[in-house]
Amino acid sequence: MDKGEFAIMEGWCPYFKQPLCGAYSKRPVDCRAYPVTIALKDGETGFFIDMNCPAVKKGLVDDEFVDGAIKLWTDSKPPRKWLEESAVHNMHGNAHYFIPISEYRKHRSGLAAGK
């Protein structure tokens, strides 16, 4: 698998070998950027984060990682067909865990301020 490839799959990743990734050095963009993803919503491209990710739940996904993941997605220029087939609303019934990055940043700011 080429590093520039995008994974399109249903169900669990075939490269995941408990507890590690079997294709780590060659994993696709969506795996390298996770839990940040890109998707079409109402015809527009947007960035989202998986709030069900254990690292997100522990507060380990900071703005530096998010910014790097967004740059990775932007630089990789995923094809429209991939975006259409991999949109958040098709993420195995888990779309409710994905929120826009702007909401995540507000959520993190609130946690840091003790709100």
Image (cartoon, rainbow, N blue to C red):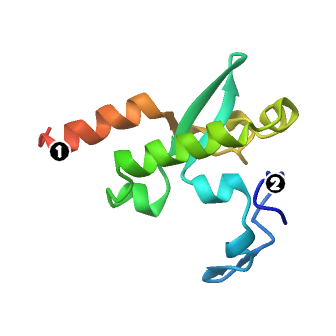
Outermost front residue: 75
Quadrant including the N terminus: bottom right
Mark 2 nearby-residue class (10 Å; few <14, some 14–19, many ≥20): some
Up-down relation of residue 52 to residue 110 (above or below): below
Dot 1 and dot 2 residues touching (CB under 8 Å): no
Up-down relation of residue 13 to residue 104 (above or below): below
Would you say 109 lies left or right of 22 here? left
One can see residue 97 in this view: no
User: Percent from the top left, x then y, of residue 48?
Assistant: 54, 37
User: Percent from the top left, x then y, of residue 10?
Assistant: 82, 55
Q: Which residue is mark 2?
A: 5
> What type is the residue that disc 2 sits on?
Glu
Q: Nearer the viewer, residue 9 or 94?
A: 9
One can see residue 34 in this view: yes
Q: Residue at x 63, y 81 (%)?
A: 20
N-terminal of the two: label 1 or label 2? 2
Separation of marks 1 and 2 at Cα, in angstroms: 36 Å
Would you say 105 lies left or right of 14 here? left
User: Percent from the top left, x then y, of residue 56?
Assistant: 41, 55
Tell me, for residue 99, which label it has, or none: none
Q: Residue at x 35, y 51 (%)?
A: 62
User: Percent from the top left, x then y, of residue 14?
Assistant: 81, 71
Q: Which residue is mark 1?
A: 112
| Numbered disc in front, either 1 or 2 | 2
Q: Residue at x 66, y 59 (%)?
A: 31
Q: Secondary structure at mark 2?
A: loop
Quadrant including the C terminus: top left
Q: Residue at x 71, y 44 (%)?
A: 91
Q: Secondary structure at mark 1?
A: helix
> What type is the residue that disc 1 sits on?
Ala
